């Protein structure tokens, strides 16, 4: 199942790599990344399309939230893989 | 003030008086600043030992341990120790030298990207880019390492930053918020589950000791009267001679503890994470049990086993609110009968030394008043099974990483954290060789640390698995060409004696408890001795292999 996760990160050295590395290490595949800065330029906004073969997203969200540079995490949508294939 | 002095000043503000390390080129400004700083530096003989010693220091003191290494190989040598602290949730500050910032990214001499290499095994990390940031980073690192679920933090310090002059400091950090408090509604649901349970078991993990929640945990056990099992790292949460304690669970757990868990209808999991060595085959683990999971780390709850009641937050606060005594006398009697029926036996045949008997007699003779540190392998499991352990900080073991070579440097760290408590490092003939150079550290500082080296002339745990699960095809486990360990110790200036007969156990125990300085007791045992019971890989904890005592 694919889901979209939106994160807000402090603009700190290694913040993006650390976050993506955690997601992959926990058994999720990062399929797409969209990044922008917020108005203050102190925060990065990442929108990630993430795929999992059955690992729970709620646990992943709690693992991401533990990272020091992460300010907020939000699961945006539910998009089953077979639904996309049918399009 | 120079950057290096700012670094040490910030550490002193946090009460740091001892650090463990090994100097080199890029970290030289820090070593220069150490002179006259008021901070004691313990020179180990390999950076891995610095990290393990800082880990041992932290586990005993409850405060972050600090280790220092230079860039390149010094930094990479720390990695195993950092990973160990990460997997066992130990607060650690690792400070590495780095090449000067203009050289970073140029493949300079002794340059490695230690920041990148350690990303998966730290709670957080920094490359210091501005001298003025140093105090903020040190205080922030301290807060991160020691708050919530503790862990290691890396500070990579380029040489020009350490040597440069600071002109002011950036803002200091906010105090770390306290652990979250448990939710009242979930607490009441947990209390209701406990009250209704017929076959409850308390599953104690390392989080109890790390969270300094031992007193609250013991009050909870006494109030509920529920039988207790523990993980490897949970040993000592209640004294191992506490009547309600059924023993360690899991792969080398006691029959009583594994049976009780498998039969239970409610598991109260406190500061544990359903590690595979504890659960065996997960989908057959405690198949009839509902789960109340208490942990300071919300990410552990539901990771491997769904919790019926999740209590994320401060363990002591949650436990204090759950003093419910269920009516479980028949179940309690059943568990205690299991414990009686499957009590350890020490009547091994022959005149050789039965290692579990030696370990038992040593810890009982000390009345548990020892800091026991372990390496990894069969001896580690025998310590866990047979030693009297009265609190978690008296049993230092590499639980998550399983790092051979941990024991001796951890004992060094433990000694500096609490010189009043005797430290005994139990090792094997494989493990001792990983950090044997630290015998020089014992000598250098006159440390009265004892080493009990259990020598079966093989990598015993691997040999055991090859015997049982690889059709006795023994591959690269024979260590019969070991050096004479007693002579090795003496060459480092450490006293030593060798024993190999049961009649020498009293002499060895007496020496381990009363010898005035460092001592290595080299104990030869039967090379074919195995650790029992054993849950085979891929099986549930209901399947426990047993074999002969040797």
Image: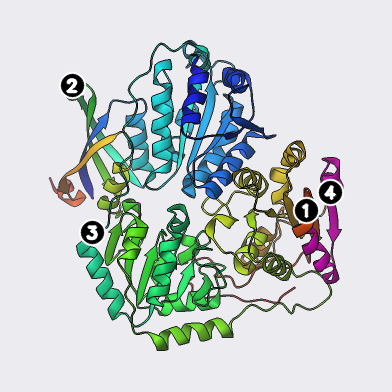
SS at mark 3 in the image: loop
Residue B168 is left or right of residue A42, and the answer is right
| Main secondary structure found in the magenta portion | helix
Instruction: Rate crowding at label 1 as few (under 14), some (14 to 19) or many (20 or more) other CA atoms within 10 Å.
Output: some
Q: Position of residue B444 (x, y in %)?
A: 75, 36
Q: Which residue lies furthest to the left in this view?
A: A87
> Magenta part of the protein: which range?
B486-512
Closer to viewer: mark 4 or mark 1:
4
- Disc 2 or disc 1, which is closer to the eye? 2
Q: Are marks 4 and 1 on the same chain?
A: yes
**What secondary structure is found at the residue carrying circle 2?**
loop
Mark 4 Cα within 10 Å, few/some/many (few <14, many 20+)? some
Q: Does the magenta stretch include residue B500?
A: yes
Disc 4 on helix, strand or loop?
Answer: strand
* Label 2 vs label 3, nearer the camera: 3
Q: Distance between the residues labelled 1 and 3?
A: 54 Å
Q: In this view, does B173 lie to the left or right of A4?
A: right
Which disc number belongs to residue B183?
A: 3
Q: In the displayed structure, would residue B423 be above or below residue B320?
A: above
The one nearer the camera, B479 or B221, is B221
Relative to residue B543, is residue B60 depicted above or below?
Answer: above
Circle 1 chain: B
Write down the residue under mark 1.
Answer: B479
Identify the residue position indicated by label 2 in the image.
A40
Mark before the other along the chain sequence, 1 or 3 = 3
- The quadrant of the rendering that contains the C terminus of chain B is bottom right
Upstream in sequence: badge 3 or badge 4: 3
Residue at x 37%, y 28% (from the top left corner): A14
């Amino acid at each position: 199942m694919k889901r979209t996760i939106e994160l807000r990160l402090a603009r700190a050295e290694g913040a993006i790599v650390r976050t993506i590395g955690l997601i992959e290490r926990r058994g999720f595949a990062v399929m797409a990344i969209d990044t922008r800065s917020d108005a203050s330029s102190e925060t990065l906004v990442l929108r990630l399309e993430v795929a999992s073969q059955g690992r729970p997203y709620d646990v992943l969200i709690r693992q991401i939230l533990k990272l020091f540079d992460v300010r907020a995490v939000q699961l945006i949508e539910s998009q089953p893989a077979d639904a996309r294939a049918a399009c | 003030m120079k950057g290096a002095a700012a670094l040490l000043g910030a550490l002193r503000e946090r009460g740091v008086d001892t650090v463990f390390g090994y100097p080199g080129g890029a970290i030289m400004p820090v070593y220069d600043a150490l002179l006259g700083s008021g901070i004691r530096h313990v020179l180990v003989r390999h950076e891995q030992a610095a990290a393990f010693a800082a880990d041992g220091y932290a586990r005993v003191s409850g405060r972050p341990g600090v280790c220092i290494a230079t860039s390149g190989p010094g930094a990479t040598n720390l990695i195993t120790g950092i990973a160990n602290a990460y997997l066992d949730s130990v607060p650690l500050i690792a400070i590495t030298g780095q090449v000067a910032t203009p050289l970073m990214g140029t493949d300079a001499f002794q340059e490695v990207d230690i920041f990148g290499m350690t990303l998966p095994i730290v709670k957080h990390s920094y490359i210091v880019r501005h001298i003025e940031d140093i105090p903020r980073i040190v205080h922030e690192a301290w807060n991160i390492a020691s708050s919530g679920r503790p862990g290691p933090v890396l500070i990579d310090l380029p040489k020009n930053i350490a040597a440069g002059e600071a002109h002011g400091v950036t803002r200091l950090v906010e105090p770390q918020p306290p652990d979250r408090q448990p939710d009242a509604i979930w607490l009441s649901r947990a209390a209701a589950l406990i009250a209704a349970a017929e076959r409850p078991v308390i599953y104690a993990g390392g989080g109890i000791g790390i969270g300094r929640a031992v007193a609250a945990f013991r009050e909870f056990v006494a109030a509920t009267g529920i039988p207790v099992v523990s993980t490897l790292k949970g040993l000592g949460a209640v004294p191992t001679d506490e009547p309600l304690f059924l023993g360690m669970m899991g792969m080398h757990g006691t029959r009583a503890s594994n049976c009780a868990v498998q039969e239970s209808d409610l598991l109260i999991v406190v500061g544990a994470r359903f590690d595979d060595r504890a659960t065996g085959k997960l989908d057959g683990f405690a198949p009839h049990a509902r789960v109340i999971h208490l942990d300071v780390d919300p990410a552990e709850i539901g990771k491997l086993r769904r919790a019926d009641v999740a209590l994320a937050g401060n363990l002591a606060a949650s436990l204090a609110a759950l003093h419910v005594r269920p009516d479980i006398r028949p179940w309690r009697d059943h568990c205690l009968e299991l414990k009686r029926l499957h009590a350890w036996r020490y009547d091994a045949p022959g005149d050789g030394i039965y290692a579990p008997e030696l370990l038992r007699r040593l810890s009982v003779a000390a009345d548990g008043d020892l800091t026991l540190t372990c390496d990894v392998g069969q001896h580690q499991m025998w310590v866990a099974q047979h030693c009297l352990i009265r609190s978690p900080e008296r049993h230092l073991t590499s639980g998550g990483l399983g790092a051979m070579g941990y024991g001796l440097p951890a004992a060094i760290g433990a000694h500096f954290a609490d010189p009043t408590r005797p430290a005994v490092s139990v090792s094997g003939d494989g493990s001792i060789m990983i950090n044997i150079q630290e015998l020089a550290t014992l000598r250098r500082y006159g440390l009265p640390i004892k080493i009990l080296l259990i020598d079966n002339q093989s990598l015993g745990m691997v040999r055991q698995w090859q015997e049982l699960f690889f059709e006795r095809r023994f591959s690269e486990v024979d260590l019969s060409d070991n050096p004479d360990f007693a002579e090795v110790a003496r060459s480092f200036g450490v006293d030593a004696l060798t024993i190999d007969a049961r009649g020498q156990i009293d002499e060895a125990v007496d020496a381990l408890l009363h010898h005035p300085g460092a001592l290595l007791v080299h104990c030869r045992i039967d090379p074919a001795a195995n650790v029992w019971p054993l849950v085979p890989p891929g099986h549930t904890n209901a399947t426990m292999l047993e074999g002969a005592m040797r």
